[in-house]
Image: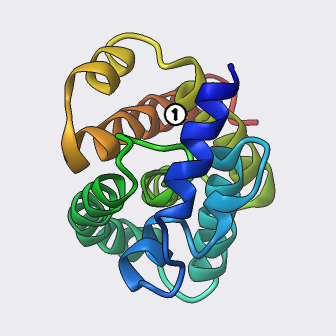
Amino acid sequence: MNDKIDDKRSALNKLNIRNPVHFLALGFGSGLLSPAPGTWGTLAGWLLGIGLLQFVSPCFLLLLAAPGFVLGIYLCEKTAHDMGVHDHGAIVWDEIIAIWLVLAFAPQQNWLWYCLAFVLFRFFDIVKPYPIKYFDKNVENGLGIMLDDLLAAIYTALCLLLLFTLGGL
């Protein structure tokens, strides 16, 4: 147990928050918060996404997420390589882009749907139902880091749309 903690600390010591690649991959530093850095990263992306939605349309947020996903493949892979750990918990750019996708697909742009989006996304990102867990375990590099969160975002968006269709909340 202590060896795992030491390995995680050692990986964190290889980071330079002043390096723009590390800074972005770590979600502007939110991935360094504990416990649950993925939740902190999601929260950072959620707040940023909601802030952006005050000025841009959900469609535009979706358009921002597309190059953010491609950029994330590089950011996450480079940072993971520098740390020597594939998909270290501190790397949260994948959560940020995924929650933007979820927010873009929220059936209504209001706090109820935003909060539901956050909770459902964290559920799918943590539980990793099939095939998310398969891709998480079997796809290496930056694409693998980004892909499991993309799938969790898709599951979340489908659940939100199903809830909206069945009852509208």
With 85 as the anchor, is 12 left or right in this view?
A: right
Given residues 19 and 123, the one toward you in this image is 19
**Relative to 100, residue 137 above or below:** above
Given residues 161 and 74, the one toward you in this image is 74
Q: Secondary structure at mark 1?
A: helix
Image quarter of residue 130? top left
Residue drawn at x 24%, y 71% is 67
For label 1, count other residues whose C-alpha is less than 10 Å away and answer few (under 14), some (14-19) or many (20+): many
Label 1 amino acid?
Answer: Thr
**Relative to 69, residue 29 above or below:** below
The number of callouts visible is: 1
Q: Position of residue 29 (x, y in %)?
A: 63, 71
With 57 as the anchor, is 133 left or right in this view?
A: left
Residue drawn at x 48%, y 54% is 91
Q: Quadrant of the C terminus?
A: top right
Image quarter of residue 153? top left
Q: Position of residue 113 (x, y in %)?
A: 70, 48
Its colouring scheme is rainbow
Residue 56 is at least partly visible in this image? yes
**Relative to 163, residue 7 above or below:** below
Residue drawn at x 59%, y 64% is 45
Residue 107 is at least partly visible in this image? no
Q: Position of residue 104 (x, y in %)?
A: 47, 59
Residue drawn at x 45%, y 33% is 152
Toward the top, the furthest residue is 130
Given residues 17 and 101, the one toward you in this image is 17
Pointer 1 residue = 156
**Relative to 162, residue 24 above or below:** below
Q: Quadrant of the N terminus?
A: top right
Q: Position of residue 88 (x, y in %)?
A: 48, 44
